[in-house]
Structure formats: structure tokens, C-alpha cells
Image: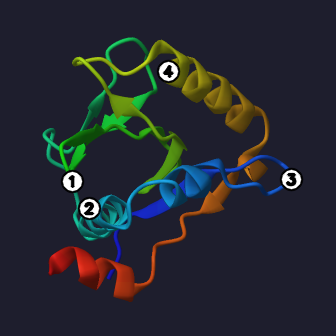
Amino acid sequence: MAVWRFFDYAELTKRNKIREWLDALPDRDRARIDSRLLMMAALLSWSEKWVSKYRCSGDLYEFRITGNGVQYRPLGTYYGTKQYIILVGAIEKNDKIPKSDVAVALARLRNLERNSSHAVPHEFDSSDAMEKDEE
């Protein structure tokens, strides 16, 4: 049973920016990210090796997920009780998350604070895609 619920940032037009980012990733990496989120959903607390406060902001956190040599760092924030919203998909390069991704995440956080309609439930890939990752 899930302890945590995940949400994605979406435009008010319901265009899901996180889903678009995930859909552009290789299938195996997308499945790896969703598998990690599903594991995290079942835990009461999360390991700091999986999520930590991002260094430049008060309410921004980064997930740490590696896929095929790529350091995925989705940025998000806690959103109510046992809820988390992913604000932007980011990739760490040279031990840094691009400043443009951080700026987008902070802007989306401000939008979310003004209008909670930006939060939509995270859509996990089908179990078929995740089974391919386990092969």
C-alpha cells in the first residue's frame, strides 16, 4: 500500500510537463525512474542517498536516480502530508544541475503556491515497460 503520493507539475491547460520529459527519455531510464518512485511511495521515510534538499533553495529537493550513465535529478517539493510534486526533470552534468532547470523549478513552485491546479497525479508507466527494465 502506498504511503506517499506523487504529483507532476502541469500547465493550467493540463499539459503535463513532467510526463513530456519522461516520455522523451529512453524506455529503460523512464522505467528506472518510475520503479524508484514506486519504491519510495511504499516507504515511511526516504534515504538521503535518494532525495536531498537542493543547496540553493529552501523548498526545492532533488531525487537522485542513475540510468545508463546519466544522473537524473528531478527537482520537486513536498506538497502536503506524504505528498510530493515533481516540478522539473533535470540531468546533472559536471556535478551540477543546470541553472535554467533550477530557475524553472522555482518559477513552477511559485505558480503552484498561487494555484494548486498545477498539481496532477503522477502517471506511472505500464508494468510492461517496468518489466523490460528488470530483464
* Contact flag, marks 3 and 2 (Cβ < 8 Å): no
* Residue denoted by label 4: 102
Which corner quadrant of the image does residue 38 belong to?
A: bottom left
Q: CA distance from mark 1 to mark 2?
A: 14 Å
Residue situated furthest bottom in the rendering? 128
Crowdedness near tag 4: few (<14), some (14–19) or many (≥20) residues, C-alpha within 10 Å: many
The amino acid marked with disc number 4 is: Val
* Residue denoted by label 2: 36
* Contact flag, marks 4 and 2 (Cβ < 8 Å): no
Closer to the camera in the image, 70 or 55: 70
* Residue denoted by label 3: 13
Q: Position of residue 56 (x, y in %)?
A: 39, 11
Q: Secondary structure at mark 3?
A: loop
Q: Name the residue located 54 percent from the left edge and 49 percent from the top edge.
A: 21
The amino acid marked with disc number 1 is: Ser
Q: CA distance from mark 1 to mark 4?
A: 25 Å
Closer to the camera in the image, 120 or 22: 22
The amino acid marked with disc number 2 is: Arg
